[in-house]
Image (spheres, rainbow, N blue to C red):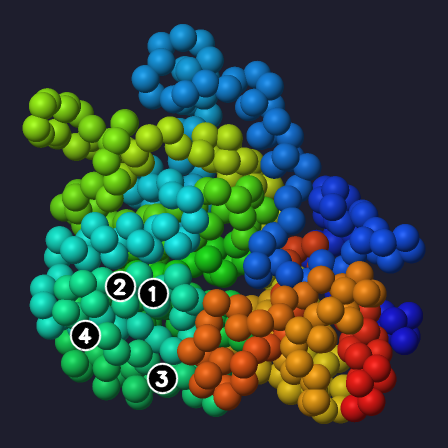
Amino acid sequence: MAEAMAELHPKVALDVYKIREDFPVLGRQVRPGVPLVYLDSTATSQKPASVIEAMNAYYRQHNANIHRGIHVLAEEATAMYEEAREKVKNFIGAASSRQIIFTRNTTEAINLVAYSWGLSQLRRGDLILLTEMEHHSNLVPWYLLAERMDLRVEHVAVTAEGVLDENDFDRKLAMGPRLFAFTHMSNVVGTINPAKTMIAKAHQAGAVTLLDGAQSVPHFRVDVQELDVDFLAFSGHKMCGPTGIGVLYGKRELLENMPPFLGGGDMIKKVTLGAFKPNELPYKFEAGTPAIAEAVGLGAAIDYLNKIGMDVICQHEQGLVRYALERLREVEGLRIFGPSAEKKGGVVSFLVDGVHAHDISQILDQYGIAIRAGHHCAMPLHEKFQVPATARASFYLYTTFEEIDRLVEAIYRVKDIFGV
């Protein structure tokens, strides 16, 4: 079947087979004679050799703590760390590298905003507006803050198609939220929200905006100045970089007025017995020894993505998701969640009638196919769809159309095993 379907594969601008040579793990077999088909990039992406080698080179040649040392290694490490910050700034179109805060991940970046901006700027009874499609990382911090400060929380409804209800969004904005925090792209159904329009509407309503870019920044061009977003959070490990490094972008006037999130070394200008003066941006939010090697790795990942081109990557993924939806619709008894291809990124969540998502994933793994199964840290959205879990296949620049064929073939085997 795969050979026959290969003739129908869309033509793409990038040489995906050449790209795959850059990713060592994609050449492995998960068991003898069973090659890996990695369709779990929404959870974490694989890493090209250039990223791995950049981090190894740092540890082999330049390892030292940053900012405080005046010896050669410390100066080299500091330069590499700050060069990575500059690369991030350019990648997302920020005006200044001082607006780039390194965190551990998207989750920590959102928590930083919640506990620094939220605690200092919100007052009892203020409204936080979220959506029903948020990852738990963009729900739980606000719930904790709301409980602590006696705030109100509302959610923009999701339609049966898996897109935000525009009328409900307008109704909720009329309630006067102080903050609107939402995902740029759903990690469950792949819906790409019209962020620029939504941010403009939120600003007109007087709300500060936070955009969860964990699923958008790795896959298509995101420009913070074009969007006019107040805060943007994303993770390195989903964009060919290492784990343990994330980014918070913020408008400078907001960051300047926010108190430090964590206390310790490097986030201070002066400490006396009983008081301290915080450091300047971005360092007042980066307490202690940071993830230096991981920042270097993130910088290398940005170099890699820039070399290929974000528009080319986006085009490839659009072709993949269109093809995946066509192939999966051929499977009788398979339910696909989310909108049509033109409204979504490279994510497809589905269920097979009579088969639990975990069973689908476990059987697919026997054929070397790595997908995700569960609620994907988005339980409210699954409750909206009235299912406890879904199976999720997700794609990236190294995904091939043949791998989608293998996914569909393996789903037919799932149906055979369960007799459905």
Question: Residue at 55% across / 42% down in the picture?
Answer: 242
- Secondary element type, mark 4: strand
Residue 4 location in percent, x, y?
A: 90, 75
Does label 3 or label 2 sit earlier along the sequence?
2
Mark 1 is surrounded, within 10 Å at the Cα level, by few (under 14), some (14 to 19) or many (20 or more) other residues, namely some
Instruction: Tell me the quarter of the image containing the C terminus.
Output: bottom right
Residue 226 location in percent, x, y?
A: 34, 57
Does label 4 or label 1 sit earlier along the sequence?
1
Mark 3 is surrounded, within 10 Å at the Cα level, by few (under 14), some (14 to 19) or many (20 or more) other residues, namely many
Any part of residue 344 in sight: no
Residue 185 location in percent, x, y?
A: 47, 67
Q: Which amino acid type is shown beneath numbered disc 2?
A: Leu
Q: Say above or below: 338 vs 39.
A: below
Residue 176, quarter of picture: bottom left
Q: Say above or below: 55 vs 66.
A: below
Do the residues bearing badges 3 and 2 touch, measured as CB atoms within 8 Å?
A: no
Q: Which amino acid type is shown beneath numbered disc 3?
A: Ala
Q: Badge 3 is on which residue?
A: 157
Looking at the image, is mark 4 or mark 3 nearer the viewer?
A: 4
Q: Is residue 9 left or right of residue 166?
A: right
Question: Residue at 38% across / 78% down in the picture?
Answer: 132
Q: Say above or below: 396 vs 389.
A: above
Do the residues bearing badges 1 and 2 touch, measured as CB atoms within 8 Å?
A: yes
Spatial CA distance of label 4 from label 3 is 16 Å
Q: Badge 4 is on which residue?
A: 152
Does label 4 or label 3 sit earlier along the sequence?
4
Spatial CA distance of label 4 from label 1 is 14 Å
Q: Badge 2 is on which residue?
A: 144
Question: Residue at 31% across / 72% down in the picture?
Answer: 130
